[in-house]
Amino acid sequence: MKPSAEQLESIKNILDSVTNYRETYAELYDHILTALEALPNNDSFPCALHRIIEIELGGKRGIAKIEATYKKIATKEVFKRYLAYFVGYLLSPFLLVAIALTVVAYKLFTKSFEELGWLRVICMWLNVIPISVTKIIMAKAKRDGLYNKLSVIRTIYSWVAAFPIYLSLALQLIIYLISLVVSLNFNQYLYINLAMFFLNSFTVLAICRLCRDELKLRLAI
Amino acid sequence: MNANPFLKGSLQTIILKLLEDNNEMYGYEITQKVKEMSGGDVLLTEGALYPALHKLEADGFLETFTQVVDNRVRKYYRLTEEGGKQVSSKLSEAQAFIDQLQTLLNLKPAVK
């Protein structure tokens, strides 16, 4: 059976309503069409479509399960790669560059709390870089006009990119809470912030590497 | 996949073996191959197939590539080097399991 343009549209509409991500949409669209094309021409299209979606794919719940599994696996995979890059940079010659940058930061921001505030501002801007990179990649993919749905991988990249910001904010909150119980002196504040600056350079590099992979691999379907 | 729990537990082995024999396959093709080989006795549902494929991909046993076929994107799966090594180990596990069942349940091997 070769579905007509109208029938193709109805398949797209159904999949649009039950899928959230581009990868699953594309894979299931091809699956449904291939299954329909394997049927004889005199088969009823609505019955065949109903059987494929409701019985073989398990309906809305089944498709949601396929997506959820894919998302879970993809999330795990991206975080695993992110961590591997982070550790990889930590053990690479970049470590010396990061130490040198931290020493420079130490020399520049040791005079007052006001100067230390600037170090925090720099850290925050460092964290903005990955988010900007992922946004640029997403905008580029959208311009390609191949899809109208989000990609699971790109959605996860956005979370990973935002992760250092949340981590940084959480650490600032922890420091604030500690300072309510134990009074921290300037040096202690300075070392904590320098440590954050040092680690931030690795988180930024790791996410930039992930984004570079994404650009290379063109995971978008 | 049909309700047989033995088959459910062997889904990954079946997929790996099929891909070893056929080099590269897409989802629908796998379901049809299983149906054909089992004479229609084993029906692989897509609700079970795709999560298993994605899991094998995430574990590094499968890799994917896409091709545009009839104006739509088709995702193909094939074994990675690691996946190739995994096939024989999974098959040995399956064989050991079958042997154990035969011993425990005193089953006679099927004669064709």
Image: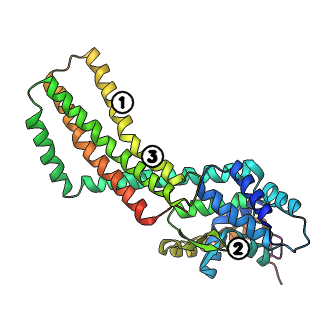
Badge 1: few (under 14), some or many (20 or more) residues near its Cα, within 10 Å?
A: few
Check residue A170 in the rendering and tell me which mark sits there, or answer none. 1
| Magenta-colored span | B38-42
Element type where label 3 sits in the image: helix
Mark 2 sits on what residue?
B29
Looking at the picture, which amino acid does disc 1 mark? Ala
Single out the mark in the foreground, 2 or 3. 3
The disc, 1 or 3, on the residue closer to the chain's N-terminal end is 3
Q: Mark 2 and 3 residues: CB-CB less than 8 Å, in contact?
A: no
Of the 4 image quadrants, the one containing the C terminus of chain B is: bottom right
In the rendered image, residue B72, in percent from the top left (x then y), is placed at: 65, 68
Which amino acid, by three-letter code, is at mark 2? Glu
Q: Are marks 1 and 3 on the same chain?
A: yes
Residue at horizontal 45 percent and vertical 52 percent from the top: A139
The CA distance from mark 1 to mark 3 is 18 Å
**B62 relative to A159 in the view: left or right:** right
Q: Is residue A160 magenta?
A: no
Question: Residue placed farthest to the bottom in the image?
Answer: B112
Q: Which mark is residue A158?
A: 3
Residue A46: image tag: none
* Chain under disc 2: B
Q: Chain of mark 3?
A: A
Q: Would you place residue A175 above or below residue A101 in this image? A: above
Is A125 situated left or right of A61 in this image? left
Q: Is residue B109 visible?
A: no
* Residue at x 32%, y 30% (from the top left corner): A171
Q: Are marks 2 and 3 on the same chain?
A: no
